[in-house]
Amino acid sequence: MRLGRACEILVGWHDERIEAAMEIKTLAELQQPDEASLMFGPWGLGSMSAENAAKFHQEVVAAYELAGQVPDSTRQSFDRLRTIYAYGVLCYDLYTVAGEQARLFIEQALRDRFLPFYSGEVRFIDSEQQPQSITATDYRGFYQQLHSNGRLRKPKNWKLQLQSGRAPIRFDGMLDSLLRWARAEGLLAGQRDRLRDRPRLDLRNLAAHPSYHLGMPPDAAAEIADLAAIINRLWGAPGGLPHSREVVIIAWDERSLTWGAADRFLAGGHVTGAETCVVVRAGAHDDLGSYDSLYEAVTTPCQYLWGPGTLADAHAWAEAQRQEVDEAPLLDRLFILRYYNGALYLPQAVPVAAGLDNAQITGTWYLIRADSPHDAFNHQRQKLAGADNHVAHGYCRCPVEALGEGQLPDVLTMAATEGASITPITVPDTRVTMSMTPRCNRILGNGTWDIPPDDPSMVRLFAAPG
């Protein structure tokens, strides 16, 4: 009886605390917009009407659509997340809820993708190099089997076998190993994006073990956008928009430089005279001011097609060939770099390196996966110069993956294994005269390097004006 009475007293006290702490509103009051939510609009902080705010915030998250192949279980959770965000116009705290739920939901998306990727049978290899497998119909059942009977601990020490052909990896089924799995199987793209995996894990942990805080609508929208990109990549949608390229003419002389789409290049009448020209496949709005036929001096993918020659000949060639628009990947590109006689040269496309003559292939060559040639060059330059914490093989702390080194034929074989074409492409040695990008850096050691003083870019850099 005493225990029962105590429970009654505690329940009553608890109900009083709830009534005292929480204001019970009418339905009409619950439907009133939150003044804080009206302050965030398309042009930053300001003030919007409730109607415009409701429309704007829904349009923000409506832009993040999932690919058609994403399964219903993942899609329904994502749609619920967008609904929570949309209702933030009535309760500002829901933006914080939406942002934290997006961080947590990354793990569900990876789990939803894992078993179907292996058709329900996941293959492992144990410490004695014997094949093992787990068959399951849902991730929870798989996870329980994985952690039973000491399979992940010594002496069994199971490791996950990958379809990509990469070496088996340690896999415990948690978020960090799910992210590594998705990278290793090529389901997530981008070396710069890879560096965000650690913060993603940390932010998920903060959401799972929270303390009170208040986020803003743009923060939540950014989390939802990142989540949508991850989901679409997991189910085979592009890991970022592919780079659309068309036929572009680059024209220059000692004092001027211009470029544009071949079919519109002459329309403006701004190019006359006998400029040196090349025809390339690139984005018409790409920065091509450092174009170099032999080296990847342009950030975006740029493919040599014709030249050098006169403007009239360039236009005639482009008219006759009628090259089609294509798309090139911007992420996880393969680059080959040469280190010879104390100098590291700019990255080259694999087919261009394969087309070099014998006099150009001496030295040590490196194969690097990166999102831009500048990332690849910076990594290898620092590694050779003796900077700390840059790896010779594998994922680096900078946005690259070092794949191997050796003589050029060996490195080309590695590139072919990674799916690159090693069919030789021979290009002429030509580059924009006005380019300030040196073709190589001298590696001095102790974390330092410089530009060879006889490099044309160095001469132009310090040339007297006029």
Image (cartoon, grey):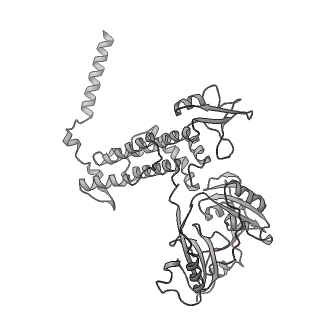
Q: Quadrant of the C terminus?
A: bottom right
Front residue of 40 and 274? 274
Q: Position of residue 82 (x, y in %)?
A: 37, 47
| In the image, residue 396 above or below residue 363 | above
Q: Residue furthest front?
A: 320
Q: Is residue 94 above or below residue 392?
A: above
Indicate the position of residue 419 as horizontal and vertical percent values: 66, 56
The structure residue drawn at horizontal position 74% and vertical position 57%, both measured from the top left corner, is: 413
Q: Main secondary structure of the magenta part?
A: loop
Give residue 63's quadrant in the image.
Answer: bottom left
Q: Is residue 183 above or below residue 438?
A: above
Q: How many marks?
A: 0
Provide the residue span drawn in magenta.
419-438
Residue 293 in view, yes or no? yes
The quarter of the picture where residue 74 lies is top left
Q: Is residue 444 left or right of residue 93?
A: right
**Viewer-proximal residue among 168 and 263:** 263
Q: Which quarter of the image is occupied by the N terminus?
A: top left
Front residue (pair 63, 342): 63
Whether residue 443 appears in this view of the structure is: no
| Membership of 4 in magenta stretch | no
Residue 88 or residue 173, whichever sits in front: 173
270 sits left or right of 124 in the view:
left
Residue 55 % position (x, y): 29, 54
Q: Residue 147 location in percent, x, y?
A: 60, 29
